[in-house]
Amino acid sequence: MFKILKKEILNNTVSMMKIHAPYISKKALPGQFVIIRIDEFGERFPLTIFDYDRNLETIDIIYQKVGTSTMKLDKLNEQDYILDIVGPLGKASELENYNKTIVVSGGVGGAIACPLSRRLKELGTHTEIISGFRTKDLVILEKNMREIDNNLVICTDDGSYGRKALVTEILQEKLNKNKYDLVVTVGPIVMMKAVCELTKKYNIKTIASMISIMIDGTGMCGGCRLTVDGQVKFACVDGPDFDGHLIDFDEAITRNNMYRNEEKISREKYCNLKLL
Amino acid sequence: MIINNNKFKEPVEILNKTERVSSFKEVEFVLSDSNALKEAQRCLNCKTRPCVSGCPVGVKIPEFINCIVNNNLEKAYDIISENNFLPAICGRVCPQEKQCESKCVKNKIGEPVAIGRLERYVSDKFIQKNNNYKNNTNKNSRKIAVIGSGPSGLTCAAELASKNFQVDIFEALHTPGGVLSYGIPKFRLPRNILDSEISKLKNLGVNIKTNIIIGKSLSIKDLFDMNYSAVYISTGAGLPKLMNIPGENLVGVYYANEFLTRVNLMNAHDTNYDTPMKIPEKILVIGGGNVAMDVARTAVRIGCKEVFVMYRRTEQDMPARRDEVIHAKEENIKFLFLKTPVKFIGENNILTGLKYVNININNNKLEPDYTQEFELKINNIIIAIGNNSNKILFESEHNNINFEPDGRIITNTETTQTSMKYVYAGGDAVTGAATVIEAMGAGKRAAEQIQKDLENI
C-alpha cells in the first residue's frame, strides 16, 4: 500500500500526487515511469515519475483524467492509499553530452518534459522549452518550466494563452535561427510524429518518449510493442525513449487506440455508476 | 493384497462440455475414493521403482501409492510432501505422461498407473496440512533473498525456511505465484488451490514482498547490503519469443503472455474489472505446447466462437500435456497441423489475415513448402511459441552474473551456483521455458547448496 501525502490540482483535468514509495524514490531517474493498480479491480497502467525525493522517500506523479483508472485515481485524496505501485520502470533517458537542446512538449506530456529538461540543465546543456496546449485552461507546469527556461514559449491551438501556433511552427522558427544538437519530444503521438518529421529535415537527433499500453512493464506481455528501424521493440524495457526518426508512428497511433471502444464503454459505465 | 489387473486407468469424472465452455471451473475432478483405491491397486509396487526415476524431485511414488492401498492417506501425503512442496499443483499440471507415468511398467500392457491423479487425490485431502515443512520459530540470523515467486522460488523458500533460515521472496507483480498465477488458467489450476499452497509458505514464516523488481527497484548488490547472505534467482522465462515474420506488430496480433495475463491476472474478461479485453468471434493460436492449449481453451471460455490452433508438426509431436489436447478437442477447438505462418497481413496497421505454408517432415526435419502460399482471413492471432528469460535482472549495477545471449543464466546444474558468489539460479530462468516440477527440483537443489555453502562461513 502506498500513501498519498499530497494532492495538487493543476487544471480541471490534470492533478499531481506526492506518494510515499521508498524503493522507487531511491532508484528513480528522469524518464522512468511506474505502473499503478489502484484497487483489486483496477488495471495496471503506466504513469511517468515527475519528480522524486530520495530523502523523503517520495515520488510525484501527474495524471490526466481520461479514463476509468485515472478517474478512479482522482477519487483518492491525501492520506488515502494506492494498492500497488511498481518501478522505476523503463530505461532512464540518455541526455549526456549535448550542447544545445529544445524540449518540445504537448499537453500532459509536460509531466515528462519537465524532469527531462531539468536533467539536461543539470548536465550543463543549454535547454529551451516549447510547450503546447489546446487552450488556456489546460496549461500546466508553466512555473516549473520557466524555472528551467526563462524564455519558455507557450502556445495554444486557439491563441487563448501564449502564442497562437502549433509547437512545430515555433520549433521551425528556432531551428531556422540557431543550431541545436538534440530535440526531445513528449506528448500526443500525432504531435511527436510532426516534430520528428520536421527535425528529420534539419537532420537533428530527436528523442521521442513512447509510453504506451502496458500491463506488467517488465517485458512480459508485449502489449507495448512498436516498430523502430524495422525491429520489434518493447516500450517498457527497451524504451520509453526511442530515436524519433526511426519510429513507425502510424503503427504506434493505431496500437495506442487499440482499446478505444472498450475504454469508452468502461468510462461510461464508471461515470454512470458515479451518478447512481 | 488385492491387485487390480485393469489394463486401463480407472475413470475420472470430468466437467460436462456445456458447463466447461461457459465457465472457468476445473475440468477434471478429483478421483472418487473407490476409484482412487482401485487405481492404487493397479500399482505393482515394483522393486526397481522406475517411476521414481522419472520424477524430477524423486517423489517416493510406490510408497505413497501403497499407503492409499492401505487406506492411510495421511501417511501417503507425508511421503509425497517429503519431496514435493506443491503436490496439489504438480498433480494437476505435471506432464506425467512424459515423466513418472512414462516409466511405469504397466505401459507394456496398457495404460500406466495414473500417478498424477493419485497425487492430486491425496493432496486435495490434506491441502491445508503443513506437515513436513515445519515453521521453526527459532530462526537463525541468516537471511536469504529469493527473486520470483513461481514454483522454483516457492520451493527453494520453503526448503530454506524449514531449515531455520529467514527467507524473503521478492515478486515483481502485485500477486505471488509467477506463471502459476499469470499463466496457467483457473480451469487447470483453481486459484484456491494455488492460494492454499502459497499460504503454507506464509505459515513457514516466509515474507513475500510484491511490487519489487530486482534490477529496477533494488539491485543484487542492494540485497547483500541489506544483509542477505545468499540470493536465489528464480525469475522464470517471461519474455515472449518473436515469430520474426512481417506484420508482427499489427493490431490483432498478440503474444500468449498478454492474452493470458489479461484473463488470469487481471480478470479482463469480467466486466467488473477495469482491464479492457476484446472478445473476438474467431481466433487463431500459433503453437503446440501447453501455453497454446491454455490460450485456445481460455478463448473458448471468454466467448470466442471459433478457435483454431496452427502447429508446425503433427498431433503426436505436440509438447502439450495429452489430457489438455483431448480436452481442447472436446471443446471444439480445430487443429491445423503441419503448417507454419509466413506473414501477417494487414490494412491500416490492423490484422486482416495470415499467409501460411505447408510443412513436410523428412527424417524429423521440418521442410516448409514455400512454393505454395495459403491465406486465412482472420483478425485475431495469438502467438504461443515459447518464452525466453527476462534480462531485466542484469540491469542491476555491480552484478557479474554470466548469462547466455538469449538471457538464460549460466549455472552449475548440480549446485545451481552462478558466476557470482552466493548467488544461485534455477527454473526457467536457467533452462528456458520448461516444467513446473523441473523448476521445483532446481529450487530444492539450490536450497541444499545454499545451506552447505553457508555452513562454512
Image: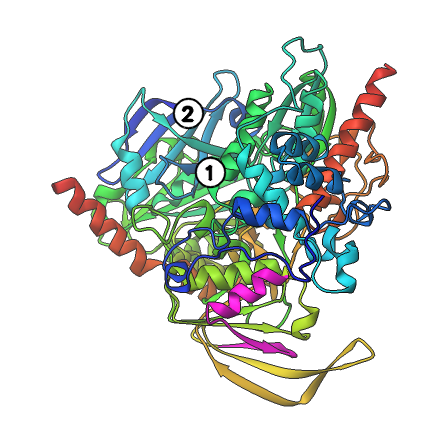
Q: Where the N terminus of chain B falls, by quadrant?
A: top right
Disc number placed over residue A207 in the picture, else none: none
Task: Please report the bounds of the magenta region as a residue range.
Answer: B322-345
Which three-letter amino acid code belongs to the residue tagged 2? Answer: Phe
SS at mark 1 in the image: helix
**Is B294 part of what is drawn in magenta?**
no
Left or right of residue B210, residue A190 in this image: left
Which residue sits furthest top? B138
| Residue A226 visible from this viewpoint | no
Q: Name the residue under label 1.
A: B192
Q: Position of residue A269 (x, y in %)?
A: 21, 49
Q: In this view, does B375 lie above or below B442?
A: below
Q: Can residue B436 be seen in this view?
A: yes
Whole-Å distance between the Cαs marked 1 and 2? 27 Å
> What type is the residue that disc 1 sits on?
Asn
Pointers 1 and 2 in contact (C-beta within 8 Å): no
Given residues B248 and A128, the one toward you in this image is B248
* Residue B31 or residue B156, whichever sits in front: B31
- Which of A32 and B104 lies nearest the eye of the viewer? B104
Name the residue at 73% across, 45% down: B438
Numbered disc 2: what chain? A
Give the residue furthest to the front. Answer: B1
Q: Tell me the crowding category of disc 2: few under 14, some 14 to 19, or many 20 or more residues within 10 angstroms, Cα based.
A: some
Return the residue at label 2: A2
Furthest residue toward bottom:
B371
Residue drawn 66% across and 34% down?
B76
